[in-house]
């Protein structure tokens, strides 16, 4: 294989891997943010009244 061609292939593959790493990092951060938001919302509210029996008079 011609050294220039081989070097070009390596550069292209490196660029692809970097783009994939950025996409993966963004997806992971978005997932963490969503989980933190869900946890924050669920810990702040208690919904015990939803399944409670009606109060008798």
Image: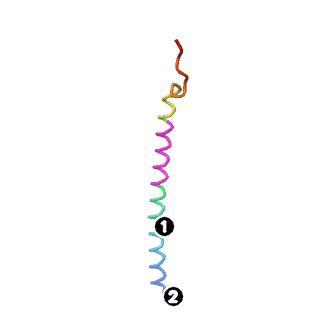
Q: Which residues are magenta?
A: 26-39
Image coords of residue 5 (percent x, y)? 45, 84
Relative vertical location of residue 52 with respect to residue 12 in this rendering, above or below: above
Q: Which of the pair 12/44 is nearer the observer? A: 44
Mark 1 vs mark 2, foreground winner is: 1
Mark 1–mark 2 distance (CA, rounded to whole Å)? 22 Å
Secondary structure of residue under mark 2: loop
Q: Is residue 32 magenta?
A: yes
Task: Give the residue displayed 48% in from the left and 67% down from the top.
Answer: 17
Counting every numbered tag in the picture gives: 2
Q: How is the image coloured?
A: rainbow
Secondary structure of residue under mark 1: helix
Task: Give the residue displayed 51% in from the left and 28% down from the top.
Answer: 50
Image coords of residue 36 (percent x, y)? 49, 40
Q: Residues within 10 Å of mark 2 (few under 14, many from 20)?
A: few
Image coords of residue 3 (percent x, y)? 48, 85
Label placed on residue 1: 2
Q: Is residue 37 magenta?
A: yes
Question: Residue lying furthest front in this view?
Answer: 57
Label pair 1/2, CB-CB below 8 angstroms: no
Task: Give the residue displayed 49% in from the left and 82% down from the top.
Answer: 6
Prevailing SS of the magenta stretch? helix
Task: Please identify the quarter of the rendering in which residue 4 is found.
Answer: bottom left
Image coords of residue 42 (percent x, y)? 50, 34
Residue identifier under label 1: 17
Q: Which of the pair 20/47 is nearer the observer? A: 47
Relative vertical location of residue 48 with respect to residue 28 in this rendering, above or below: above
Relative vertical location of residue 16 with respect to residue 26 in this rendering, above or below: below
Q: Residues within 10 Å of mark 1 (few under 14, many from 20)?
A: few
Label placed on residue 55: none
Task: Give the residue displayed 54% in from the left and 28% down from the top.
Answer: 51
């Amino acid at each position: 294989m011609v050294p220039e061609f081989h070097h070009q292939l390596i550069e292209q593959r490196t660029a692809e891997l970097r783009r994939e790493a950025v996409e993966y990092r963004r997806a992971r951060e978005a997932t963490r943010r969503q989980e933190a938001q869900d946890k924050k919302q669920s810990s702040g509210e208690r919904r015990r009244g939803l399944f409670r029996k009606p109060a008798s008079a």
